[in-house]
Structure formats: C-alpha cells, structure tokens
Image (cartoon, grey):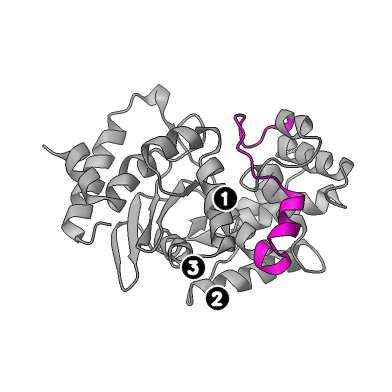
Amino acid sequence: MIDDLSVLGTLFRRAITAVEAIPPWELREMDAPGVCPAPGACISLKDRTLSIGAVDEPFTLMSAVKPFLLLYQIQQHGINNVFQWVGRQASKLPYYSLKQLEHDQGIPRNAMLNSGAMLLAAKLPGDNPQDQCARFQLWLRGLVPGAAFDEDLDCLGDLLQPGSDPINLQLAQRLQRAGSIADAAAAYEVYFRTCCIKSSVKETAKLARHLAFHPQDAVLAEVLHQMEIAGLYEASADWWSRHPYPSKSGVSGIMFTINPGQGAAAVGSAWLDSGGNPILGQLILPGMLDGSQYKEDWAN
C-alpha cells in the first residue's frame, strides 16, 4: 500500500482532474442530505493513517454499512444461521431489484443487496427500530474508539416520509410475505436507520482496517467473499477482475477497499456512475493499495 503522503496527494489531484474531464451526461453529482460534502481520501495502515482532502466531516454510510452489519450478525448468530437467511450468490440485477427477490422466492441472494441488508437489519436485537440501531451503533463505536457514528436525522427524516421510497418498501413487503421478516414497516425503518449512520472518510478507513486485520477465520472469509461478489452490485465481477481487493461502495459517495493484512483505504466524493458506485473511488483506490498501479496508470 502507498505509505508516502506526497504520492497519495499526486494520485488524488490527478484523479480529481480525471473526474472533472468526464462529460456531464456520464456523471451523477449527488446533492441531497447525507451525501459526501467534498472529496477526500484516507489510507489506514496498522500503525498510522495518511489523509488528503475532506476526511473528517461525517456523512451517511448508506450501503457501505452492509459488510459491518453482516459481520455483526455472524458474530451474534453464527455463519450457519445467517446464511440460512441470505444467500452467497452474486446478482446481475441492480441492488434494489424486486425482480431478483421475486425470482429467489423472497430469500435475498446476498447480504449486500438492499433486501439482504434489510433482512439482517430486521434481525438486530432490540425492542424497536431505534433501539436496534442504537445497539448496532454501540458495537461500531467499539471498533473505532472516539467515532460517534450518529444517525443523520435529516437524511433519515427524508427517507421515512410516506411514499419516499416505494421500491425498498416493496422489498420489505416481499420479505414479509416470504416469512423472512415479521414486520415490513419496522424492517424498512431499521434498515434506513443503519444506512443513515454517519462516518467520515477517515473513520470509514479505520472501520475497514478492522476487516483488514480481523483474525483470518471463516467469519472474515464470508464477509470478504460477499464484498468480492457484490460490493459494487452488478459491477462487482468486472471490478474484481481488474482490481482483486474486497471493496464496498455507497450512494452517499463513500467507497472503501481492503488489502488483507496490510490495511485499508477509503475515498469520498459526490460523483457517482450510472450504477450508483462512486467514480472517484474507482479511479483512485487501486493506486492507493498498490504503488505499481500508481506508476502504471498515473505516470506523466
């Protein structure tokens, strides 16, 4: 992994320039509550971090919370139980696809799909959605001491407005009809509460570092496998073929990548591609993990 701040700075600036050269019709710049406020990048090694840009202001994790939700539930319930609830297969359809869930008869194909994460969120311990999320937040704080991991109440309020997201509500209702969850409305709420947990780029890199240095056991292998097959949704296979590092993205603009045993890196920006994956992260993360990639892709 890069361990030179000047190299990271050069990579970051050139990546920003590359994004700015993309035609506007190929670029989605998000402008909504909970979205990354400004570009930033952070590498978290075992003994130090390297950062550039806006890395300290928290914004919502959105789907980037899903690997940690999976890790938490495996630790709570065991691998065998969790993978009776969700599958281990990739999906070629978008992460919010009701068609995929219907095809799979109400059993989410993997834990990185919205339906899979919604099911896992619904099974968090607690008396109600707010309590369930609060207990999960407490666990996250144990992974990154000093991080608040608060909820973004403005973003959450928008998402919980009646009729604001009929597609995800349909996913919850389909899960309930399949018997996978007991209460669609409660599952919908706790899912979005977990998605609205805030983390800065630096805090996300430190969360990801926990995966990089987690004991090399079956639990870690399952979480990383899910990131490999579905971390960038239907674009995951193409990403993995070019950059074989477990990665996860979120529509808030965060994206992180793991280099097991070495460290982790996170990038934030408001620029997304058509699949909902952050463009700046896709450009810069391979170079952050591998100095030879830096020399090959960004020379001259």
Depth order, front residue of 157/119: 119
Cα gap from disc 3 to disc 1, whole angstroms: 23 Å
Horizontal side, residue 21 vs residue 147: left or right: left
Where, quadrant-wise, is the N terminus in this rendering? bottom left
The location of residue 130, given as percent across then percent down, is 74, 64
Residue at the (40%, 46%) spot, across then down:
269
From the viewer's perspective, is the residue at label 3 or at label 1 nearer?
3
Q: Which residues are magenta?
A: 74-98
* Amino acid type of the residue tagged 2 in the rendering: Gly
Residue 186, by quadrant, is bottom right
The location of residue 151, given as percent across then percent down, is 61, 62
- The answer to whether residue 39 is visible is yes
Residue at the (80%, 39%) spot, across then down:
106
The location of residue 148, given as percent across then percent down, is 53, 71
Residue labelled with disc 2: 142
Residue found farthest to the left: 300
Horizontal side, residue 18 vs residue 277: left or right: left
Q: Which mark is residue 62?
A: 1
Horizontal side, residue 215 vs residue 191: left or right: left
Count of numbered circles in the view: 3
From the viewer's perspective, is the residue at label 2 or at label 1 nearer?
2
Residue labelled with disc 3: 214
Secondary structure of the residue carrying numbered label 1:
helix
Residue at the (18%, 49%) spot, across then down:
10
Secondary structure of the residue carrying numbered label 3:
loop
Work out whether mark 2 precedes mark 3 in sequence or the reverse, and give the earlier one. Answer: 2
Rendered position, 15 above or below 45: above
Q: Which mark is residue 5?
A: none
Residue count near mark 2 (Cα–Cα under 10 Å), binned few <14, some 14–19, many ≥20: few
Residue count near mark 1 (Cα–Cα under 10 Å), binned few <14, some 14–19, many ≥20: many
Residue count near mark 3 (Cα–Cα under 10 Å), binned few <14, some 14–19, many ≥20: some
Magenta-span inclusion, residue 77: yes
